[in-house]
């Protein structure tokens, strides 16, 4: 019997985030159908070369993980003791393994897919943090680890794939939390700051947002032949505002979202969007970091959309503070 290890939860998410969608596609599906005796328990984990496979614990704090959860996340059988083990976080798993939800990444080492890892994180994270995680998994970028540069790439998964996986996940723990989070996801962010702006704008009032939901990331506006004379450069065929609300002419732009080095480009794009007949609202880091200044901008956006923003009750102000802490708090690993 060949012993197997199944990496899961945040370790799986960090593995795919670090290695990218090309590795994900190239990794064959696991033939494991259930947590049988071939799945390693605590005493068998030292037989696997995690370093050679490029597997490590997710850097902390990527998201608010409960204290004591350190090391590489692995699944163990339900009848195996989940005692503390240096270098690992052990998670009991009941029932079958969903078909196609685990990939083989190295000899004996299996890795939960982004969709399964998302569901696994639901009992650990609140809905708001789960939304933040899902937006990162569906985003078209990653952060180069050495310098933190934003690099465009294909998303690890999509809103559709996450929702389809949740729908066939049965009665897993916190599955309703997964559904609530997945309903708030959108594809296609291309920077962490777009995700921050989206969540501050669009999260429901009960979760500290301004309730301006229904927005999309980077939805293209095609330049018509008769509008070519408006272009700021001849090679531009489509302009993609950071956030837009379908069915309206309202757009929101985060100026200088790539580490504040593209402000000039953002301004030219914003002028073009305005000339094409759209109402474009500009947001920068100073506005986002200042709750009062950001509140004014959100009132302007809501007015343009014909919507109301939440009443400034004590409950909403507390929820807004919690959301801002999650998104803007210090010592977060940006994904």
Image (tube, rainbow, N blue to C red):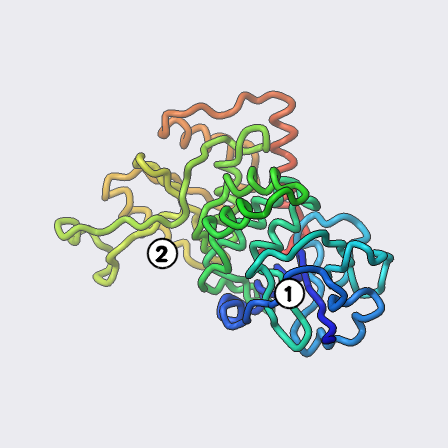
Q: Nearer the viewer, residue 328 or 3?
A: 3
Q: Which residue is mark 1?
A: 32
Q: Secondary structure at mark 1?
A: loop
Q: Which residue is mark 2?
A: 265
Residue 73 in view here: no
Residue 295 in view here: yes
Name the quarter where the N terminus is drawn: bottom right
- Taking the spot 31% from the left edge, 50% from the top edge, the residue there is 220
Which residue is at the far left? 226
Q: Nearer the viewer, residue 97 or 250?
A: 97
Q: Name above or below for residue 46 compared with residue 152.
A: below
Q: Name above or below for residue 290 compared with residue 299.
A: below
Measuring from the top left, give residue 150's x and y in whole percent.
50, 62
- Taking the spot 37% from the left edge, 41% from the top edge, the residue there is 244
Measuring from the top left, give residue 189's x and y in whole percent.
45, 52
Measuring from the top left, give residue 162's x and y in whole percent.
52, 50
Q: Secondary structure at mark 2?
A: helix
Q: Residues within 10 Å of mark 1 (few under 14, many from 20)?
A: many
């Amino acid at each position: 019997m060949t012993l197997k290890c199944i990496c899961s939860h945040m370790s799986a998410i960090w593995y795919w985030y670090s290695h990218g969608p090309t590795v994900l596609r190239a990794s064959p599906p696991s033939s494991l159908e259930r947590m049988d005796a071939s799945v390693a328990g605590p005493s068998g984990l030292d037989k696997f070369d995690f370093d050679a496979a490029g597997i490590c614990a997710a850097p902390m704090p990527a998201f608010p993980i409960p204290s004591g959860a350190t090391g590489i996340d692995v699944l163990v059988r339900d009848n195996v003791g989940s005692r503390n083990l240096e270098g690992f976080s052990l998670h009991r798993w009941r029932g079958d393994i969903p078909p196609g939800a685990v990939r083989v990444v190295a000899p004996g080492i299996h890795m939960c897919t982004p969709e399964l890892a998302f569901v696994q994180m639901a009992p650990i994270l609140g809905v708001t943090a789960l939304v933040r995680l899902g937006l990162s998994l569906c985003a078209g970028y990653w952060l180069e680890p050495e310098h933190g540069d934003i690099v465009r790439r294909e998303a690890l998964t999509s809103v559709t794939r996450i929702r389809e996986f949740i729908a066939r996940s049965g009665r897993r723990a916190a599955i309703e939390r997964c559904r609530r989070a997945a309903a708030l996801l959108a594809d296609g962010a291309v920077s962490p700051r777009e995700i921050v702006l989206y969540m501050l704008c669009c999260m429901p009032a009960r979760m500290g947002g301004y309730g301006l939901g229904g927005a999309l990331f980077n939805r293209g506006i095609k330049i018509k032949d008769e509008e070519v004379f408006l272009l700021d450069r001849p090679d531009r065929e489509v302009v993609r505002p950071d956030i837009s609300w379908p069915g309206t002419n309202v757009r929101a732009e985060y100026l200088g979202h790539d580490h504040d080095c593209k402000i000039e480009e953002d301004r030219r794009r914003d002028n073009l969007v305005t000339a094409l007949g759209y109402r474009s609202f500009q947001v920068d880091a100073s506005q986002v970091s200042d709750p009062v200044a950001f509140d004014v901008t959100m009132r302007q956006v809501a007015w343009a959309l014909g919507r109301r923003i939440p009443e400034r009750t004590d409950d909403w102000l507390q929820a807004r503070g919690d959301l801002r802490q999650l998104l803007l708090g210090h010592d977060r690993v940006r994904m």
